[in-house]
Image (cartoon, grey):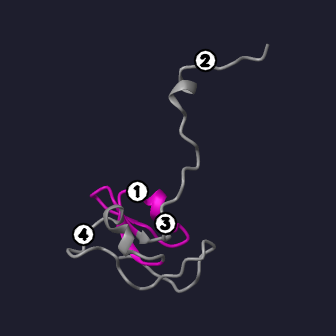
Amino acid sequence: MLAISSFTSPKGVRPTGNACLGQNNDSLVEYIGNHCQAGDTIATKHPAYFCDFNYAVAFNTFNSAMCIYTGKQAGERVPAVSASSKDQTPKTGS
């Protein structure tokens, strides 16, 4: 069960009370995201990208989570390392 409160999070998300889970109630937001709005309850394999952690996040044994949707996919906190910079050795102070 997912507990839903009525406060608005610092991200500006307020729960809608609607579930955005597709026709069979088992779809992941990664595949139906265009139909979901911020504040909907969603299922996702990638909670770090889609969930508002100011609300409860429920994880299950299918390696997925149910949570309140932020309304968009979050960006990377750490930029990806390009192939050219991975091949370089670190510079030492000299």
Q: Which mark is residue 26?
A: 4
For this orientation, the residue located farthest to the top is: 94
Q: Residues within 10 Å of mark 3 (few under 14, many from 20)?
A: some
Residue 32's spot in the image, x, y percent?
Answer: 32, 68
Find disc 3 in the rendering and name its residue. 72
| Distance in Å between CA atoms under marks 3 and 4 | 19 Å
- Does the CB distance between marks 3 and 2 fall below 8 Å? no
The residue under label 3 is which amino acid type? Answer: Lys
Left or right? Give the position of 8 relative to 71: right
| Distance in Å between CA atoms under marks 3 and 2 | 37 Å
Q: Residue at x 72, y 17 (%)?
A: 92
- Does the CB distance between marks 1 and 3 fall below 8 Å? no
N-terminal-most mark, 1 or 3: 1
Q: Residue at x 27, y 67 (%)?
A: 27
Secondary structure at numbered mark 3: loop
Q: Residues within 10 Å of mark 4 (few under 14, many from 20)?
A: few
In the depicted view, which residue is nearer to us: 84 or 10?
Answer: 84
| Distance in Å between CA atoms under marks 1 and 4 | 15 Å
Find disc 1 in the rendering and name its residue. 46
The residue under label 4 is which amino acid type? Answer: Asp
Q: Give the magenta part as a residue range.
A: 39-66
Say which quarter of the image contains residue 37.
Answer: bottom left
For this orientation, the residue located farthest to the left is: 24
N-terminal-most mark, 3 or 4: 4
Q: Residue at x 52, y 59 (%)?
A: 74
Instruction: Give the quarter of the figure containing the C terminus.
Output: top right
The residue under label 1 is which amino acid type? Answer: His
